[in-house]
Image (cartoon, rainbow, N blue to C red):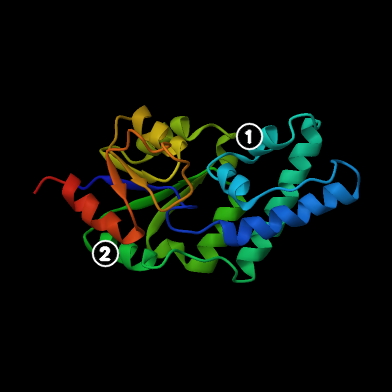
Amino acid sequence: MLPLLVFDYDGVIHNNLCVYEPAFRKVHEELIRDGVIAPETVSSARLSGWFGMTARDMWLDFHPELPLEVRDEAAARIGVYLVENVRNHKARWYDGAAEALDALKEKGFQMVILSNSRAVTGEAHFAEFGLAKWFLKWYDSESCGWLPKSEIIKQVRKDHPGDLIMIGDRYADLEAAKAVNAPFIGCAYGFASPGELDGADYLAETVTDIPGIVDSIIPA
């Protein structure tokens, strides 16, 4: 039986910066305008450092002094704008992502997504890109009570007994793989910081590397 392939989404299949950055900057400007936070500059590099975090963890890192309800409300507004961007066809996959998924599907692999996202984000991407063609399910952190991926992946294994392979670009994905003793393919083209993928069993330099790496893991 072939192992289940568990994909992170942003930084692996989808270049999240194209929809997240304009959504974040819109809310950031609103918070400054309303006097909630002082004027400040936030680089694209800092933005990409938040990818892989839950929305709550991102705001805890960004402005921990704000009350929880203010942080949650700001995160929700970013989510609304982000989904609008997806529905307005501004989301972009990495070149070759669809072809890589086609190759894996043709070989008989079943695939799911495990993302630190809100449920509505997964729904928007399923609709925009026809993800049901490749993926059985989108596991999102919101629907799982914002548990870390290292806990959610245990539910994935219960739902799909047997071996699995984790594929992601952040430390949270590596930790998820470790939690169930699964091989981990680190995606070096994503948003990982230097050294963040140390400990990965395999490294993909582009999304098109993934099918070949998966083949190398499976015994002949």
The circle on residue 103 is 2
Q: Nearer the observer, disc 1 or disc 2?
A: 1
Query: Left or right: where does residue 195 sit relative to residue 125?
Result: left
Residue 62, position in %: x, y?
70, 37
| Along the line of sight, the residue nearer the viewer: 201 or 142 | 201
What kind of residue is marked 1? Asp
The residue under label 1 is 57
Q: How far apart are marks 1 and 2 (CA)?
A: 35 Å
Q: Earlier in the sequence, mark 1 or mark 2?
A: 1
| Along the line of sight, the residue nearer the viewer: 170 or 8 | 170
Query: Left or right: where does residue 164 sit relative to residue 217?
Result: right
Residue 170, position in %: x, y?
45, 41
* Image mark count: 2
Query: Left or right: where does residue 185 sit relative to residue 76?
Result: left
The circle on residue 123 is none
Q: Which residue is drawn at 52% across and 66% down?
A: 92
Residue 59 in view of the camera: yes
Residue 95, position in %: x, y?
40, 68
Instruction: Tell me the quarter of the picture where residue 17 sits.
Output: bottom right
User: Relative to 191, is 106 above or below?
Assistant: below
